[in-house]
Image (cartoon, rainbow, N blue to C red):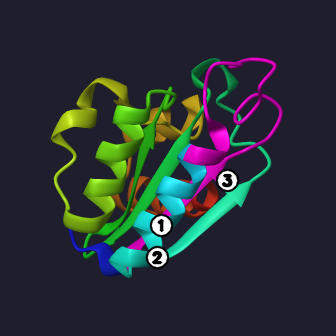
Amino acid sequence: MDTRHVTVTVCRGCCCGSDVKHPDVDHEGNLAVLTHAAQSSGCGVLRVVNCLDECDRSDVVAVRRRLPAGPEIIWLGPLNDPLDVAVLGDWLRRGAPGGLRRIVWRRWCSPSVRRVRRSRSATHAARKRAWCARLCARH
């Protein structure tokens, strides 16, 4: 993975990072591991946001990679196990997410985007996918 074009977004809102929902998780320690990994890799940006609206999977991290074909967002969660956090940190430093496959998922912006992908025009669907990528990048 080319780590120079990566943005790591860490959810720390109503559920993620909360001792109320996950009292046995070292949320600050996990954030420190990811912050150190992002800084030492030179990947650029680690953002902490209020809510990524994936509370069922808390704690959630979204890794956005800029690729030639367009941005890719990899969602990870629940990210509560220190081993998973360490593997993500290694991934940010070196690449290869192999150990995280069980907590990775793809998030679609809305059901309407899926309908458009099956719709009449490939050009229209491509424009809608670009819109979806921009919208998801804001969250």
Dots 2 and 1: beta carbons under 8 Å? yes
Q: Is-magenta flag for residue 77? A: no
Q: Which residue is painted at 36% across and 54% down in the image? A: 89
Q: Is residue 12 above or below residue 80?
A: below
Q: x, y (%) of residue 95?
A: 20, 60
Please tell me the numbered disc located at residue 139.
Answer: 3
Rendered position, 123 above or below 4: above
Task: Please give the residue where the numbered disc 2 appears in the rendered image.
Answer: 39
92 to 83, vertically: above or below: below
Structural distance between the alpha carbons of marks 3 and 1:
22 Å
Give, as a single range, the part of the protein colored magenta: 5-29
Magenta stretch, main secondary structure class? loop
State which quadrant residue 81 falls in: top left
Describe residue 1's horizontal placement relative to residue 66 as left or right.
left
State yes or no: discs 2 and 3 in contact (Cβ < 8 Å).
no
Q: Can see residue 119? A: no
Disc 2 to disc 3, how far (Cα)?
Answer: 22 Å
Q: Which residue is mark 1?
A: 36
Amino acid type indicated by mark 1:
His
Left or right of 93 in this view: 80: right
